Image (spheres, rainbow, N blue to C red):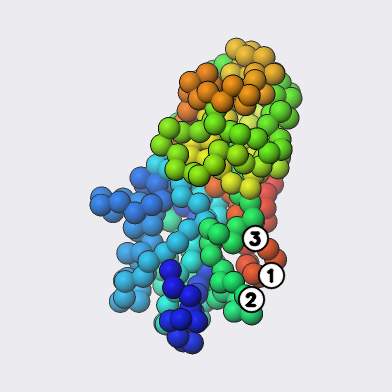
Amino acid sequence: MPNRRMLGINVKRLILGIQYDGTPWHGWQTQLSGLTVQDQLELALKKFTQTDIKTSCAGRTDTGVHAIEQVVHFDTIIDRPTASWVRGLNTHLPPSIAVRWVTVACTDFEHEFHARFSARSRVYHYLLYNHPVRSPLWEGKAGWVFRPLDVDRMQEAAQGLIGTHDFTAFRSADCQAKSPVKMMHDIAFVRRGDLIVIKLHANAFLHHMVRNLVGSLIYVGNGSQSVTWLSELLVQKNRHLAAPTFSPHGLYLAKIDYDPKWQLPQAPADAFAGF
């Protein structure tokens, strides 16, 4: 995307905070079917502005994956109040997608803001429903595990993942990342009754990395594997030795972390603050 200074002084870069229920959609990235979040957002932009506008996001999500706060940017010469952008776009978006806030990117810095490349880290939450019988109330919103899970064992196993590691064992075969080496800042577990929230914070994630990690953590939690198993998988670097990719339904893109200099009106970092 061209630099705004090259395009002209009237071009502004707008930044949006987007929330969506991923259940009806085939992920974020545009497809010929038009059944993606990006397609729906760009369609709403066209209806609202009567122009074609292309967007860039902080992190592409897969089919069925939700976003508590996705961050998106685009460039435009249209000058409207930020509240008007919020109201206008939401008028044209389906109920499962909403623009939560809009701001104009700051221009006092050497580099342009970019939703993806300006991000310092990402936070994903995975919501598990742990009960012998499935609940229709959590269908599409939480992953279901019918065998009892020991959260203390899962937390102990997760400590071996903290730090900078080669996460090849938890990488999709379709992953296009240049390197499998990522820095995991933290993995936390909180249980309230039958619900378990797994909070993962890393500089970046590989394709299907969170779902593959969750699947393997479940094997530890139900006693199928030892608490040292995940550390062993890191060393072995073999995706086939880890657990299958777990359901997308409980996965939420929760937070994109940026330098405070960008002054984004983001929501609090912990979306599941009650847990």
Q: Position of 103 compared to 201: left or right? A: left
What kind of residue is marked 2? Phe
Q: Nearer the viewer, mark 2 or mark 1?
A: 2
Q: Which residue is mark 1?
A: 261
Check the picture and name the quadrant holding the N terminus.
bottom left
Q: Which residue is mark 2?
A: 109
Q: Position of 73 compared to 148: left or right? A: left
**Place of residue 121 in the rendered image (x, y in percent of width and height, measured from the top left):** 63, 51
- Do the numbered discs 3 and 2 sit on residues whose CB atoms are within 8 Å? no
Q: Earlier in the sequence, mark 3 or mark 2?
A: 2
Label 2 environment density (alpha carbons within 10 Å; few <14, some 14–19, many ≥20):
few
Tag of residue 258 = 3
- Front residue of 63/240: it is 240
- Residue placed at 59% from the left, 79% from the top? 107
- Front residue of 261/102: it is 261
Residue 108 to residue 143: above or below: below
Label 1 environment density (alpha carbons within 10 Å; few <14, some 14–19, many ≥20):
few
